[in-house]
Image: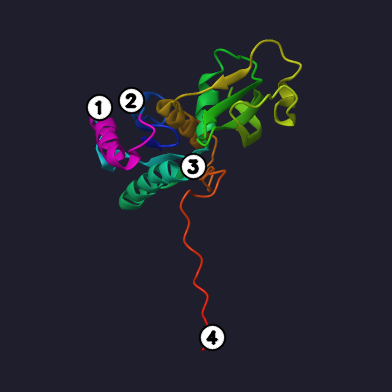
């Protein structure tokens, strides 16, 4: 069984079977307060699935993109659970979970996923055709762009320029069940680690102060 965790926008946890069946999802849309709710969501996801912690064999961690403070809470929770159970963590880019759900709207691929990155910016990833598993390939990004910017001539979106229709999707949530299902597919394909570094895109809002200069006597 796979336990999926993500706090890149709101907070979410899900339990997914090895064949990709979503057994439970527990979510909070609040973009703040991740630390206060993630433990409860983990407990709820396990309870709703009727699965004890001892049956979890892998933990899927949403690796962003997302704001530093919120994103690291979910990653830390995923790693702590995995460490406690002695199971591996598989990192999954959160935008990839959104993209996996968009194959119904874009059956041949070719679209962009954007999420709120705060500070009046969006994080954007661009997806091309589908891979052998029927999943969109991320071909560019994630990168930050001003929320109100004119992207019509932006090189990031150049692969979509000759495609018909509106192919820019602003996602307001990460589908946590889809993230777990994506982990199941990648595990079946032989992947064991996935993304290893969080996609923060920006330094933390609060940084350590520089050391004080010593004044000679």
Q: Label 2, on which residue?
A: 23
Give the residues drawn in magenta, as a range. Answer: 30-47
Residue 15: image location, x then y, percent: 34, 31
Q: Tags 2 and 1 in contact by the CB under 8 Å rule?
A: yes
Q: Nearer the viewer, mark 2 or mark 3?
A: 3
Which of the pair 209/19 is nearer the observer?
209
Q: Is residue 180 above or below residue 171?
A: below
Task: Give the label, 1 or 4, closer to the camera.
Answer: 4
Within 10 Å of the Cα at label 4, are there few (<14), some (14-19), or many (20+) other Cα atoms? Answer: few
What residue would you read off at disc 3? 91
Question: Which residue, given by chain and number where applicable, does mark 1 sit on?
Answer: 48
Q: Which residue is mark 4?
A: 216
Q: CA distance from mark 1 to mark 4?
A: 64 Å
* Tag 4 secondary structure: loop
Question: Is residue 26 found left or right of 137 in the rendered image?
Answer: left
Disc 3/disc 1 C-alpha distance (Å):
24 Å
Element under disc 2: strand
Rendering quarter of residue 138: top right
In the image, what residue occupies the spot 50% across and 35% down? 118
First of labels 2, 3 by sequence position: 2
SS assignment for the magenta stretch, majority: helix
Do the residues bearing badges 3 and 4 touch, measured as CB atoms within 8 Å?
Answer: no
Mark 4 vs 2: CB contact within 8 A: no
Question: Is the C-beta separation of discs 3 and 1 under 8 Å?
Answer: no
Query: Does the magenta-highlighted stretch encompass residue 139?
Result: no
- The 10 Å Cα crowd at callout 1, few under 14, some 14 to 19, many 20 or more, is some
Instruction: Kindly report the distance in space between the C-alpha atoms of the residues bearing marks 3 and 4.
Output: 49 Å
On the image, the x and y values in percent for residue 88 come to: 42, 47
Q: How many residues crowd around disc 3 within 10 Å: few (fewer than 14), some, or many (20 or more)?
A: many
């Amino acid at each position: 069984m796979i336990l999926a965790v993500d706090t890149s926008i709101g907070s979410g946890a899900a339990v997914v079977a090895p064949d990709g069946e979503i057994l439970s999802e527990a979510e909070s849309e609040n973009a703040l307060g991740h630390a206060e709710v993630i433990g409860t969501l983990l407990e709820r996801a396990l309870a709703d699935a009727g699965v004890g912690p001892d049956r979890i064999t892998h933990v899927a961690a949403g690796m962003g993109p997302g704001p530093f403070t919120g994103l690291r809470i979910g990653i830390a929770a995923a790693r702590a659970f995995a460490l406690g159970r002695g199971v591996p963590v598989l990192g999954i880019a959160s935008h990839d979970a959104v993209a996996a759900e968009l194959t119904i709207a874009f059956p041949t691929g070719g679209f962009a996923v954007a999420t709120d990155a705060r500070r009046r910016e969006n994080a954007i990833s661009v997806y091309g055709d589908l891979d052998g598993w029927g999943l969109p390939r991320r071909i560019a990004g994630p990168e930050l762009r001003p929320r109100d910017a004119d992207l019509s001539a932006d090189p990031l979106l150049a692969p979509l320029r000759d495609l018909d229709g509106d192919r820019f999707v602003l996602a307001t949530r990460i589908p946590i069940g889809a993230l777990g299902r994506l982990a199941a597919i990648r595990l079946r394909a032989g992947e064991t680690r996935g993304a290893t570094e969080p996609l923060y895109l920006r330094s933390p809002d609060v940084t350590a102060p520089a050391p004080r200069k010593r004044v000679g006597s």
